[in-house]
Amino acid sequence: SQKIEQNSEALNIQEGKTATLTCNYTNYSPAYLQWYRQDPGRGPVFLLLIRENEKEKRKERLKVTFDTTLKQSLFHITASQPADSATYLCALGNTGFQKLVFGTGTRLLVSP
Amino acid sequence: KAGVTQTPRYLIKTRGQQVTLSCSPISGHRSVSWYQQTPGQGLQFLFEYFSETQRNKGNFPGRFSGRQFSNSRSEMNVSTLELGDSALYLCASSLGAEANYGYTFGSGTRLTVV
């Protein structure tokens, strides 16, 4: 069955450093991958989408890579700030479908 | 513009009861999807509606149902509630017919079954 793995342990980093979160998947060939941010008690917020034919995408301090051979995506936040503290979810999808398959998320804690 | 609105925000129900949750998508968004989020399972897909038609359904029992109205507003219903139905129910709307535009989620309805 489809499986998406994100590090269940919280990632603790210092302000100003680069945070790198990992999303690995098996038994799936997604057409695109999305990253979301979720704060406690709130719905996820869409951050970035990367397609299977794209290697890298950037948006301000965010960078996403997508390696379909390794079946892995890396999500980077450069110059991290305490306000970046949240849970980050990756989600996979395919063309022709509205269903996304979500990972369980990684909690990021950025300390001043 | 207004975001995705879900009502109510919190709900406490007793086992065996039924519940209806409501979702108003962003204006112009015709696709509405529902997800259940629990600490153990994460976000699980329930179903998706586009132009009043259910196009996709997740692996949930028939007690979970939904519908979409002509103005794109959507409701989901859970009958014969069980303790395990306690969760955050999230509605998401999307501009396109596919999820490759990214979802806009509501803040969710926190359902507690006692």
Image (cartoon, rainbow, N blue to C red):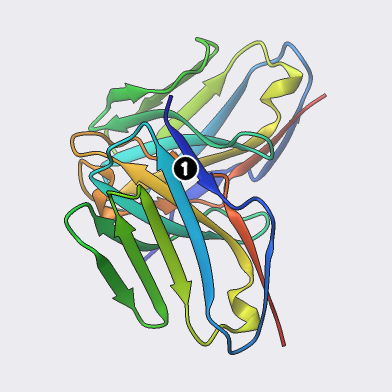
Measuring from the top left, give residue B47's x and y in whole percent: 40, 27
Measuring from the top left, give residue B56's x and y in whole percent: 32, 24
Q: Please give the residue where the numbered disc 1 appears in the rendered image.
A: A102
Q: Is residue B58 left or right of residue B13?
A: left
Q: Nearer the viewer, residue B104 or A35?
A: A35
Q: Is residue B1 left or right of residue B77?
A: left
Q: Identify the residue shown where x is 46% and y is 52%.
A: A23
Q: Nearer the viewer, residue A40 or A13?
A: A13
Which element carries disc 1, helix, strand or loop? strand
Q: Is residue A110 above or below residue B94?
A: below
At label 1, which amino acid type do we have? Answer: Phe
Q: Is residue A16 above or below residue B106?
A: below
Q: Nearer the viewer, residue A31 or B76?
A: A31
Quadrant of the image containing the C terminus of chain B: top right
Q: Is residue A16 visible?
A: yes
Measuring from the top left, give residue A100's x and y in whole percent: 37, 39
Q: Residue furthest right?
A: B114
Quadrant of the image containing the N terminus of chain B: bottom left
Q: Is residue A32 left or right of residue B87?
A: left
Q: Chain of mark 1?
A: A
